[in-house]
Image: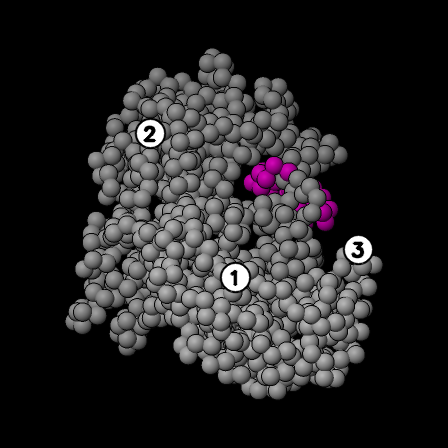
Amino acid sequence: MEFRLLGTVSVDTFTGPLPLGPAKRRSLLAALLLSANTPVSISRLTDSLWDDTPPLHARSVIQGHVSRLRALLVGADAEAYGVELVTLGDAYVLRLPETLLDSQRFEELLTLARGQRSPADAVLMLKEALSLWQGPALSGAFAGRPLQAAAHSLEESRLATVEQLARAYADLGEHNRAAAVLRAEAVAHPMRESLAAALMTALYRAGRQSEALDWFHRTRRLLADELGIDPGHELADAYALILRGDPGPDTGRNAPDGPGTAARGPVRADGSGGDSSGPGGPAGGGTGPVPAARPAADRRTGPDGETAAGPGDRPAEQPGGRSGGAVGGAGVGAVGAPSQAPPRPLSVPSLAGEPHPTDLLPRAPRGFQGRTAELAALTRAAAGEAPVCLVTGPAGVGKTALALQWAHRNQAAFPDGRLFADLRGFSDTGEPALIEVLREFLLALGVAPRRVPESVAAAAALFRSLTDRRRLLVVLDNARHSATVRPLLPGGTDCVTLVTSRHRLEGLIASDAARPVPLDVLEPPDSTALLAGVLGEDRVLAEPVAARRLAELCGGLPLALRVTAARLAGRPTWTLAGLADELADERSRLTFLDVDDTGVSAALRLTVQQLPQDAVHQLARLGHHPGSHFDPYTAAALAGTDPVVATAALERLAAAHLVTETAPGRWILHDLVRLYARGMDPEGGPDALIGVLDHYIATALAAADTAEPGGEPCFVLPEDYHRPVAVRDFVDRPAAMHWLAAERDDLALAAVAARTAGFHDRAWRIILLQWPQVVWRVRDSWSPLLELALDSARARDDAYAESRVLNLLGWVLTEEGRTAEAVVLLERSPVLARQAGDRLGEATALINLAVVQAEQGELDTALEGCGRAVELAREERDAHTEMLALQHLARMQLTANRPHEALESVRTALDLGPEHEEIARRVLLLTTSGEARLSLGEEDEGIRLLDLAAEEAENSGYDEGAVRALQALLRVTAEPDYLKRYEQAVRRLTEDG
């Protein structure tokens, strides 16, 4: 099985491509594949499938496409390939091995090609990568804005690969092939100046100077006619250099360092090139598109005033014997007019001519595993002009290791040297003085000690001057502030700066266009591979399940994995399973993840000690959160603050990579950070838990009131209830229902935590407050959670609570077909409600009991009970409960073949409440009314009412109601559209309910 994005979006199998169907289904598949193994929300899919305002039934359309796509994959035995399309809350995830996706294989081949020292090997891999393309990316899909952007990004990557292939051919001296590769793309993209410039250079080196010049003039005219602009710097430079004869035919030498770097500097007549090749080390090379050096200055002055001769001291010979000079203007004027280049304000010493370029890098990390995507991202980030690459991530995630691994892999790309400084931004010893870092850099670059300036500003200026026009790598490790980094940035446009930090350093992104490369924890395969790298493969292969469990307990954090491996390596008799059992105990896990002076706790402590006190307090309280994620309201409840203060603290924690924002306003904690945070303030645990439990009660009450307005509260509040400072406001029913669905798992975890801590009065209330979602998705396995609520109600011997819980649990069991169990519970509920003086609770209990009795054939008893519920609701003047009782009474009257009475009950119920706020109940009443009309022989009116009920249910996402209405329709008509809508509703209900 193979998934294709590089061409027509498709899924290829041994028996041929899967019949994906319409463009929108291909769009959905493309959106899932572009974020393979990552949840994609319904809203993001909606943006990919519709450019303008999506239809009201957009969610249903998406669910239908997902269902069909899932069926196609199952039919193609996708599970055997490790492929699975799953639903996660309000999102979908397409899980698959990345080797099955052509765009991922394309990226892997590019990474491999950049690592080749032989240009011939690189050519083979680049050609194989390009062979994966079978047309424009994402063809056959509906081009929504997100997919347009993705297709453009993929196309840019393809064009960059074509240019890289041409450079590899040039390194082999095969300039005609380079020109052939470039010409096809230059024709297709006539205004892409980098292609035109590369093609001109290839043509000239192939001895086709007139074609090269002709291509320049064609491109220049096109730019002027279409865009009204002159050729840019790159195109003009290529033209000028051809006129001067600088990029003369290459010797075709097979450079040992590979094709990863373009030889963009001029090739001089004396054989030296602008790539600074010479005794200092070979030019070019590298494993990615790192900028090449500019032409060296004609004369250079050393740091002590000495003048150093360079290759530029001899004028280059042009064809015809003329001496070369600068070409005026943008390369189109003063052709052939010799002139001297203007003197530079500050001359700098030659670094390329030194026998051994400066290298301050620490050794390459040992046992480095994975990170293919991040290394490739770092290579892409380093491909610009004077790039600042920012590697960010939490403590222990391996930022320094990634930076050093990339630096060592790309050694040949920096012939003028590699500098390194540990800025100790998160160290007990404090940060080094900037002047000391600059002094070390300047001394490494050959500046005499007596010439090093004493002020930071002057030393930084000299550093920028010395690094101008050089190809140098500067690694600044463990930076805490953007202001610390700026004076250490080199001055050359061909220099690359690598910064690592636990903070996001957004100031550096804003001021210096730093390109972030975020680093997350390792995937399970890479985690176990890291363990094997330390312990040996035999030991890991002997206990594969235990190795994977260790990786999970370490949360994929490289530091934790290395500490774990170190403990095992020093104890050869220990088993992996034994250590995993010890780590499974949360109370001691962090202790086991420390060894000597290295460990997770130490790394986190150094991060936390840099935080302001409000952020420290917030982090400590987050450690007591019983759920998996939190928003500003939840965080505020835990910390005893308000959402504004909590948001500011969360932003500080996110900047320090102690919390992760997974969606706007939604954060999570890494498991090990959570354990560390819990230990920061163990005494604050009960207060934090009560705060978040009461927050959930307040928010769920607001959601229930918005989702089903007009009804009585489903309980009174606890006596010691603490109302939060602020409660989320829900603008409409969909927003409230979305919150209840999204928070279901965390509400369950909160209820369990409440019961464990003895807060039984909170536990059953948090569960019961989810009743709108229970009604909406009754088949979604609610009974275990409601049984937990029943246990908590009985733990306090609370008749009021027990009756309320029994009402909902009995109804759910009835809907699940477990009527015998439901009767046992529901028969107790009215009695308990009367004991508690809860008349409305008694009415609700009578309704639910009547429903079961009707199903068991005791119709007269059921009608009597439902009638009594109507009376109780009217006595209490509660229209909501009366409407509910009338709804069920009408259904029972219809079952008893009393359609006129059923219609009267429906009319009375509909007159009680605002229709638009009671969608589910209105749908059920309309369905009953339609069926009553059919019983009276009024077929047209019955079909109209049932169709209206189905349509309203579909538009509101009430699939249960849609199924009921459409089932009734199909009993009297074989209309194909009704059958199609029924099947779609059943499919949605099966997938989501």
Q: Residue at x 67, y 52 (%)?
A: 144
Contact, mark 3 vs mark 2 (Cβ under 8 Å): no
Residue closer to the observer: 917 or 975 = 917
Q: Amino acid at mark 1?
A: Leu
In primary-sequence order, the first of circles 3 and 2 is: 3
Element carrying mark 2: loop
Colour setup of the view: one colour
User: Mark 3 sits on what residue?
Assistant: 228
Using residue 953 as the reference point, say whether residue 750 is left or right of it.
left
Q: Residue at x 65, y 59 (%)?
A: 152
C-alpha span from label 3 to label 2: 61 Å
Contact, mark 1 vs mark 3 (Cβ under 8 Å): no
Residue closer to the observer: 624 or 810 = 624
Which labelled disc corresponds to residue 640? Answer: 2
In primary-sequence order, the first of circles 2 and 1 is: 1
Magenta-drawn stretch, dominant element (helix, strand or loop): helix
Quadrant location of residue 891?
Answer: top right
Q: Quadrant of the N terminus?
A: bottom right
Q: Residues within 10 Å of mark 2 (few under 14, many from 20)?
A: many
- Magenta residues? 955-984
Q: Amino acid at mark 2?
A: Gly
* Mark closer to the observer (2, 1): 1
* Mark closer to the observer (3, 2): 3
Q: Is residue 858 magenta?
A: no
Q: Residues within 10 Å of mark 1 (few under 14, many from 20)?
A: few
Element carrying mark 1: loop
Q: Amino acid at mark 3?
A: Gly
Quadrant location of residue 535?
Answer: bottom left
Contact, mark 2 vs mark 1 (Cβ under 8 Å): no
User: Mark 1 sits on what residue?
Assistant: 346
